[in-house]
Amino acid sequence: MGKILIIGAGGVGSVVAHKCAQLPEVFDKIMLASRTISKCEHIKKDILERTGREILTAMVDADDTPSLVSLIREFHPDLVVNVALPYQDLKIMDACLEAGVNYLDTANYEPKDVAHFEYSWQWAYKEKFRSKGIIAVLGCGFDPGVSNVFSAYAQKHLFDEINYIDILDCNAGSHGHPFATNFNPEINIREVTQPARYWEQGRWVETPAILDPKCVHFTFDYPVAGPKESYLLYHEELESLAKNIKGLKRIRFWMTFSENYLTHLRILKNIGMTRIDEVDYEGKKIVPLKFLKSLLPDPASLGTNYTGKTVIGNVITGMKSGKQKSVYLYNVCDHAESFREVGAQAISYTTGVPAMIGAMMVIKGIWKEAGVFNMEQLDPDAFMEALNKYGLPWENITFTGKLPDS
Ligand code: NDP
């Protein structure tokens, strides 16, 4: 039996709260805290209607470490799940350290004023968490998250040595809006407008951003979803997997984008709407991307009419008993089914379910190491079993398709 404090009442926070509420035998007390209390109250009401369970709510500004520490000390959870924004990661880790409580998130730290994310800031907390005897689990969504666990599982059970990993993320769904992002628009647009990068033979290779006509893309034939244009993108799990998977020669990340999405984004970028610096507007300072976020649909609201599926997984090639082999580990998730179960679209669902499972691993003491860990550093077996049980079943097939050479 465990107590969990979830910070962030957005699309992902709502799924984490719903999924934890479905498991009273693991999570006996749940608190959802966020900046806007009305969002917490709305989720609380929906959970009560769906499960008959009462969760607690609180208003908190996660940028304010002392308020967070007071809230944590008052509620005294076993674990804090951070599903606010990447900007808050370090403040929430500081609060967990001060209160001596375990920590888990789904996205790595990113400073507000530079569109750049990397693990070094959070890895620097390793010794502090270790000496306090608590765990920080980093990147426990789908990608990062399940993509790391798939790699760890392949390393443990399927290969003697892994040489190539390609993570392929396909959203073949349709939300019916002319333009929307599936998770926080500010974070999403900052991520996809950056130059792409992949790792090969110990070094990073930069390629043009997805909006550049020279960007790298190819058509991949996804199970269930069929052929989709997939674009090379830099994604945070590449950094930790390149370090932690032994024998790796190359790792890349691909994501599908529709022509419609790319055209809208290209225009928004060209006219300056994706800028993250302050500009003068009628005597006031505004950040264009933040203003754009306020106009775009809230990702938490997209589920209503969403149809279609997501297909996310890893193609992994390596050696087993002296022979080369390739496997494809993937999950298919249906937007409408996710909506029926927890009132959320599949991107929030595929992020929130792994966060709940990671929380379960910590609360049950299956992951009890002290320090700061990426998911591939923790034992994958119980997590993989739980994916099948709690809504994200996976397939493991021999891969016979083709991927581009570098
Ligand atoms: P949303 O924007 O829908 O939700 C974020 C929530 O955090 C909002 O409720 C927001 O409050 C709250 N919040 C923001 N700042 C603060 C603060 N200072 N104090 C307290 N609460 C705050 O985002 P999503 O739910 O779509 O995404 C949540 C996280 O999940 C992001 O970090 C995202 O990068 C990550 N993610 C990870 C994925 C993965 O596979 N690993 C995939 C998708 C997302 P308010 O309502 O007031 O704005």
Image: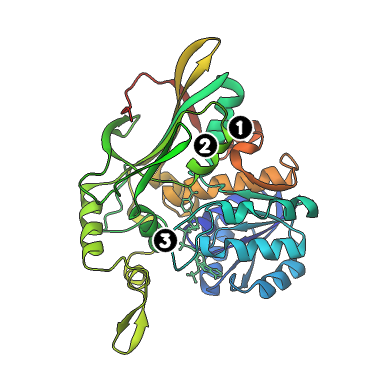
Mark 3: secondary structure? loop
Instruction: Tell me if the residue at label 3 has its CB under 8 Å from ligand 1.
Output: no
Q: Nearer the viewer, mark 1 or mark 3?
A: 3
Residue farthest toward the bottom in the current orientation of the protein: 283
- Work out whether mark 3 precedes mark 2 in sequence or the reverse, and give the earlier one: 3
The front one of 356 and 247 is 247
Q: CA distance from mark 1 to mark 3?
A: 36 Å
* Tag 2 near tag 1, CB within 8 Å: no
Look at label 2 and name its amino acid: Ala
At label 1, the amino acid type is: Glu
Residue drawn 44% across and 20% down? 326
In the image, taking residue 134 as reference, residue 175 lies left or right, namely: left
The amino acid type, in three-letter code, at marker 3 is Ala
Q: Are marks 3 and 2 in contact (CB under 8 Å)?
A: no
Residue 251 placement (x, y as % from top left) = 44, 34
- Closer to the camera, 52 or 115? 115
Q: Pointer 1: what residue?
A: 385
Residue position marked by numbered label 2 in the rendering: 242
Which quadrant does the C terminus fall into? top left
- Neighbor class of circle 3 (other Cα within 10 Å; few <14, some 14-19, many 20+) is some
